[in-house]
Image (cartoon, rainbow, N blue to C red):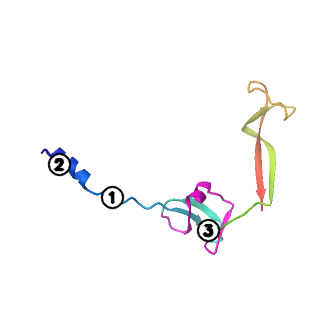
Amino acid sequence: MSNTEENFWKAWADPLPEPAPIFFRLYYDEHGSPLYYSMEDLPGNYIEIDADTYRLSSLRVRVIDGKLIHIKPKKTIFKLVPSSDGTPCSLDNVSIVVAHEQPHTKWSLKTNESD
């Protein structure tokens, strides 16, 4: 049996290494405000979270007594604002959408939420 063949059969016989554990963390500051979500072991204050919470990565949360508290905004305000990548509209009327070739102002919807 050749050395290559021996290595092949040895690789099949050796047990696979244990996979590294997967964890999800929310790091927060001294006031409980979120800093960042991570799957790394970093220095700082953190709480363990589930995969769904990690996927959402909401910044409308606080950590109070080691528990994650979701904050619902009291008001949501939508406003059209001029933008470089919005919908092209007539220079005279924001409600008339025009082709990109025509003179236009681009507008996009901005969302502001307050507690």
Q: Residue furthest top?
A: 101
- Image mark for residue 6: 2
What amino acid type is highlighted by mark number 1? Pro
Q: Dot 1, crowdedness within 10 Å: few (<14), some or many (≥20)?
A: few
Task: Report the mark closest to the observer, 1 or 3.
Answer: 1
Q: Residue at x 48, y 64 (%)?
A: 41
Inter-mark Cα distance, 2 to 3:
55 Å
Whichever of callouts 1 and 3 sits on the residue coming sooner in the sequence is 1
Q: Name the residue nearer the viewer: 102 or 96.
A: 96
Magenta span includes 89: no
Identify the residue shown where x is 80% and y is 48%: 78
- Percent across and percent down for residue 27 are 57, 65
Q: CA distance from mark 1 to mark 2?
A: 20 Å
Q: Which residues are magenta?
A: 41-67
Residue under pointer 1? 17
Q: Disc 2 on helix, strand or loop?
A: helix
Q: Amino acid at mark 2?
A: Glu
The extreme right residue here reads: 92
Q: Which mark is on residue 29?
A: 3
How many neighbours does mark 3 have within 10 angstroms: few (below 14), some (14-19), or many (20 or more)?
some
Is residue 4 positioned above or below 75 on the image? above
